Amino acid sequence: MNLFFRFLRIFLPAFFSRVHTSLMDLHIVRSAVWLGDQDPMGHMTNSRYSSFTDLAIMNYMGRTGALKAFRKRGWLPVIQYESFAYLRMLRYPQKFEVHTRLIGWEDTRLVFQHTFLSGGRVHAESTMIARLTGRKKLRVTADMAMEALGVTLDSPPLAPHVQALLEDLRSAAT
């Protein structure tokens, strides 16, 4: 991860928080575009958006208690798919927020949405599909993850385009 100091600023308070948030809550990471975040065109480079979604997922997992519960069981999160829509540029020294939300799950995959906002406007959006892997190739399902977190939830309905992405991942795995 190339945002080490930001990682410490965001992750440590999330990981050591005594109060856990709900899995379905909106989780927000606040930051600003630094000089080193820019590409030669003067806006935040595309790879930085992906780094910020990694930070946002770590914040989410720390604040919900998922990281501790999953590590205890030897489960590791793996990003299987991520896509971005870049709508507006973020430039130095612009402040922005990354809003992260779990939008649903199916079988072994969890689906997250990240929205990059600045000044009340959407600058980029990401759809991320993750799964958990266990020791000795254990197949970890979303139901197992919910049980480990002590919650009973049904997935909200997934949009047709997300269902199509999940079907593509299933097809590619066979």
Image (cartoon, helix red, strand yellow):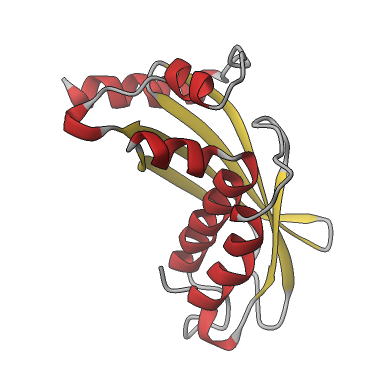
- Residue 64 position in % (x across, y down): 63, 39
- Residue 112 position in % (x across, y down): 55, 37
Q: Is residue 32 left or right of residue 62?
A: right
Q: Against 41, is 63 above or below?
A: above
Nearer to us in this view, 69 or 24: 69
- Residue 108 position in % (x across, y down): 37, 22
| Residue 134 in sight in this render | yes
Q: Against 35, is 56 above or below?
A: above
Q: Against 127, is 118 above or below?
A: below
- How many marks do you count on the picture? 0
Nearer to us in this view, 7 or 12: 12
Quadrant position of the N terminus in the picture: bottom left
Q: Is residue 104 left or right of residue 164?
A: right
Q: Against 23, is 117 above or below?
A: below
The residue at the point 32 percent across, 38 percent down is 74
The residue at the point 64 percent across, 46 percent down is 63
The residue at the point 53 percent across, 59 percent down is 55
The residue at the point 72 percent across, 35 percent down is 25
Quadrant position of the C terminus in the picture: top left
Q: Is residue 1 left or right of residue 74?
A: right
Q: Is residue 95 left or right of residue 171?
A: right
| Residue 86 in sight in this render | no
Q: Quadrant of residue 123?
A: bottom right
- Residue 129 position in % (x across, y down): 43, 35
Q: Residue furthest right?
A: 120
